[in-house]
Amino acid sequence: MASCAVESTIDVALWFLNRASAEDSYIQAQKLQRLLYLAQGCYAQEYYGRKLMPATFVTHDMGPVEPNVYRVFEAGRPQIDYVAPAAEVEEFLARIWRRFGIHPVERLNAFIIGQEA
């Protein structure tokens, strides 16, 4: 099995939260889940099936959910040290943020539903 680009899905979630905070914005839990899902899919598409993070998304009433991130973040941002990704991963995440971060969760849901996978 090929290794992932980052060791922890939590670090990717924290990257998105940090980015939103730097832009004086807030990411609700459902939007964070959509951004993680889209990042995983786009990374696999761009890097020939390689996983961005060790995440497994499950079907939920509200859409695809990574249950470990959901559980860790359900009471708010966890008190955990953030490990920044390598420069090329950070560049990739910045592209995902620019492409999808501006959209409300409803638009991200519609985009996800429209995908073949």
Image (cartoon, rainbow, N blue to C red):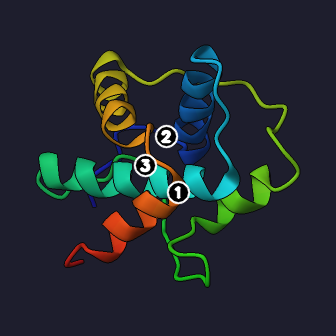
Task: Pick whichever of labels 2 and 3 is earlier in the sequence.
Answer: 2
Mark 3 residue crowding within 10 angstroms, few (<14) / some (14–19) / many (20+): many
Point out the image quarter for the C terminus: bottom left
Q: Position of residue 67 (x, y in %)?
A: 65, 68
- Left or right: where does residue 93 sit relative to residue 30? left
Q: Secondary structure at mark 1?
A: helix
Residue identified by numbered label 2: 7
Q: Earlier in the sequence, mark 3 or mark 1?
A: 3
- Disc 3: which residue: 53
Split into 4 quadrants, where in the image is the N terminus? bottom left
- Check disc 3 and give the amino acid type: Met
Q: Label 1 belongs to which residue? A: 105
User: Quick check: marks 2 and 3 in contact, CB under 8 Å?
Assistant: no
**Position in image of residue 30 (x %, y %):** 62, 59
Secondary element under disc 2, as helix, strand or loop, is loop
Residue sitting at x 51%, y 50%: 104
Q: Residue furthest right?
A: 75
Mark closest to the chain's N terminus, 1 or 2: 2
The quadrant where residue 44 appears: bottom left
Which of discs 2 and 3 lies nearer the camera? The answer is 3
Three-letter amino acid code of the residue under disc 2: Glu
Compared to 84, does 29 lie above or below?
Answer: below
